[in-house]
Amino acid sequence: MKKLSTNPRGKVRRKTREELNQEGRDRKRDKKHRGNVSGSRANGGGDVSGSGRGKQQKDPRIGSKKPIPLGVTDTPVTKQHKPKSEKPMLSPQAELDMLETDERLDALLERLEEGETLSADDQAWVDAKLDRIDELMQKLGLSYDDDEEEEEGKEDMMRLLKGGN
């Protein structure tokens, strides 16, 4: 079938051989640029991977990937209760000994005695450890070595209140 074209006057005119050849070359050029670029299969340029050895593709689905049993199960699934702390429970005496030999606590207390100010985190940590030591000493029925000094301090206060020097 021969190609026909119309001119502005409405008459039908046949295309020349050169025009037909040029249109054929244009169609061929357009078809040539379809498809993937060269080397896309070897360089991983496409979405489709050949063997899956490369990166695992991220699952595009949103939500939990936990498998859910769809059928009726004989035994209900129950979770084991995990203890809050992973370290073993120590006896009060062992915990007190451990706190008394804590190097970090000793270093921070020495800094406090020298008049240095600690950061808020360090101060909170020291306070928590000292409170824990107090609790453990009360559980064990131990008293401070400073009791004698406290009694002397009370006696000094009594003398001051009575007006004696």
Image: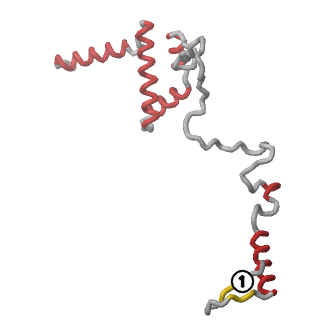
Place residue 127 in its image quadrant: top left
Which residue of the protein is positioned furthest toward the top in this rendering?
141
Residue at 55% x, 15% y is 78
Task: Please indicate whether residue 7 sits to the left or right of residue 2 in the image.
Answer: left
Q: Position of residue 135 (x, y in %)?
A: 42, 15
Q: 161 or 62, which is in the foreground?
A: 62
Relative to 41, residue 115 above or below: above
How many dots with numbers?
1
In terms of secondary structure, where does tag 1 sit?
A: strand
Query: 79 or 107, which lies in front?
Result: 79
Q: Quadrant of residue 3?
A: bottom right
Q: Identify the residue position indicated by label 1 in the image.
A: 4
- In the picture shown, does residue 110 fall above or below 88? below
Which residue sits at x=57%, y=18%? 87
Instruction: Give 150 or 69, whichever is nearer the viewer.
Output: 69
111 left or right of 27 in image: left
Q: Is residue 152 above or below residue 14?
A: above
Residue 104 drawn at (x, y percent): 54, 29
